[in-house]
Amino acid sequence: MTSSIFLDAPWEREDNNAYIARGGYSCAPAHSSGELLAVLRDADLRGRGGAAFPTATKLEAVLAAAPPARPVLVANGAEGEPFSFKDRYLMRYRPHRVLEGLICCAAAVAADQAFVYTCDDRSAESLRAALRERDYPIPVSVVTSEHTYVAGEETAVVNRLSGGLGLPTDKPPRPFESGVHGRPTVVLNVDTLAQVAGLVHPTAAEDGTPASFLASVVSIAGEPALYELPEGTSVRELARDFAGQEATFSAVVMGGFFGGMVPLTDENQVALQFVPPPGSDTALGCASFFFVDEAQDCPVAAAADAAAYLSRHNARQCGPCVRGTATAAKALESLCTGKAAESIRDDFARWAEILPGRGACAVPDGVARLLRCLMTAFAPVVQTHLAGRCERCVDLTASGRRRSRFALTF
Ligand SMILES: Cc1cc2nc3c(=O)[nH]c(=O)nc-3n(C[C@H](O)[C@H](O)[C@H](O)COP(=O)(O)O)c2cc1C
Ligand code: SF4
């Protein structure tokens, strides 16, 4: 596949001149609102921030609301998922692509102000440099925030940009109804915006479709890797490529902590696509993947560590989430230490049922999905952990690698 993001020099920051030389900013924001929406709809562009919501629909919602105030456009580069780094890659190395997408979408909804929101100083620096490199039709500000797990949830983004704390609040109202300082606001992930830029001006280096995506890939042992993949790639193919000759994997935690966990068997050819097939309980989410190494890691430990991470990093403001994630994390830990009772299956089933929708943000839904995956796709592994202590869990805990498994630095 021709790379439209990495180009020939993946680790070189693309400045304004280089971006223009390959066709950048040639159309933006020349597309009328209707034209841009048609392009996005035809391409079925889905948000890359986690929920895969159709981007055109989000823009249309603001237009349909016929707001009294001019809307605000926000590029969300918070990237709170601990093993995702594709957004930071784009902001640091391809800032103009993000900014072009931003001004195209801003023009489509007649926004008169835009923000790029990030928790990464190097991204902020690169974006501010890009903003100095050329003139933009509307004011664009780069705003930084503390790096927390929930800082990138859209209402948290709106709260922070309105001068408050970066914490989620109940919806409605959604940002398109009442966002930054009460104004209608469109929040789009920076990767989504980079895709918009690719769609509005297919250049020689691009094939004109949004069918590729950036995938952040990590495991407990290997070096993190960033891939640009065609949509539809099987998770097995990705695992093979990432493993090289070095490793085999038993499972993968998908889409950050929201996409569930799938076993990696030869039969399991889960296709990586933003709209999962009917009946699937996994999601591509923000396209970050934590591969569970067969020799050194354990799917139950990975699920326990994910739940423990969410329990430590939730915003501590919704009772069911605070209690639910902590209880689930504790129960999963009891499986790792061989202390769980058979009744844990009933507990998992109950929590998987009651947790979804019980918080201001989707953290409890993510935990519920992990539990559902464990009960269905990993039932035999759970059974082994009920039968006795898992040696791999013992080793992992003793080596201290469990607590640091999601401490990725990029
Ligand atoms: C707990 C939580 C954390 C989130 N963190 C991010 C984030 O760091 N970056 C992001 O773009 N979206 C994040 N989202 C999703 C945003 O709420 C929002 O859906 C997204 O920014 C919209 O952009 P998109 O439509 O382009 O995906 C998060 C959602 C939740 C529930
Ligand atoms: S659901 Fe959980 S993580 Fe989300 S805002 Fe409430 S307490 Fe925080």
Image (cartoon, rainbow, N blue to C red):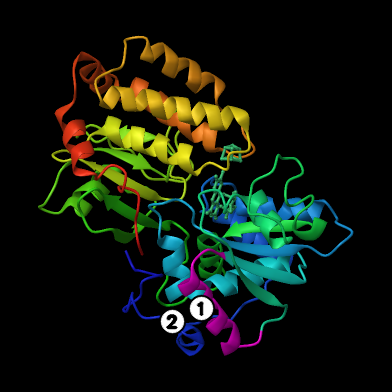
Instruction: State whether residue 183 appears in this view.
Output: no
**CA–CA distance in space, label 1 to label 2:** 14 Å
**Residue drawn 32% across and 60% down?**
227
- Nearest the viewer among 224 and 243 is 224
Q: Quadrant of the C terminus?
A: bottom left
Q: Is residue 188 above or below residue 360?
A: below
Element under disc 2: loop
- Nearest the viewer among 50 and 88 is 88
Instruction: State whether residue 393 appears in this view.
Output: yes
Q: Residues within 10 Å of mark 1 (few under 14, many from 20)?
A: some
| Residue 294 colored in magenta in the image | no
* Disc marking residue 125: 1
Earlier in the chain: of badge 1 and badge 2, it is 2
| Residue 123 colored in magenta in the image | yes
Q: Is residue 164 left or right of residue 83?
A: right
Q: Quadrant of the N terminus?
A: bottom left
Q: What residue is pinned by disc 2?
A: 14
Magenta stretch prevailing secondary structure:
helix
Residue at the outermost right position: 68
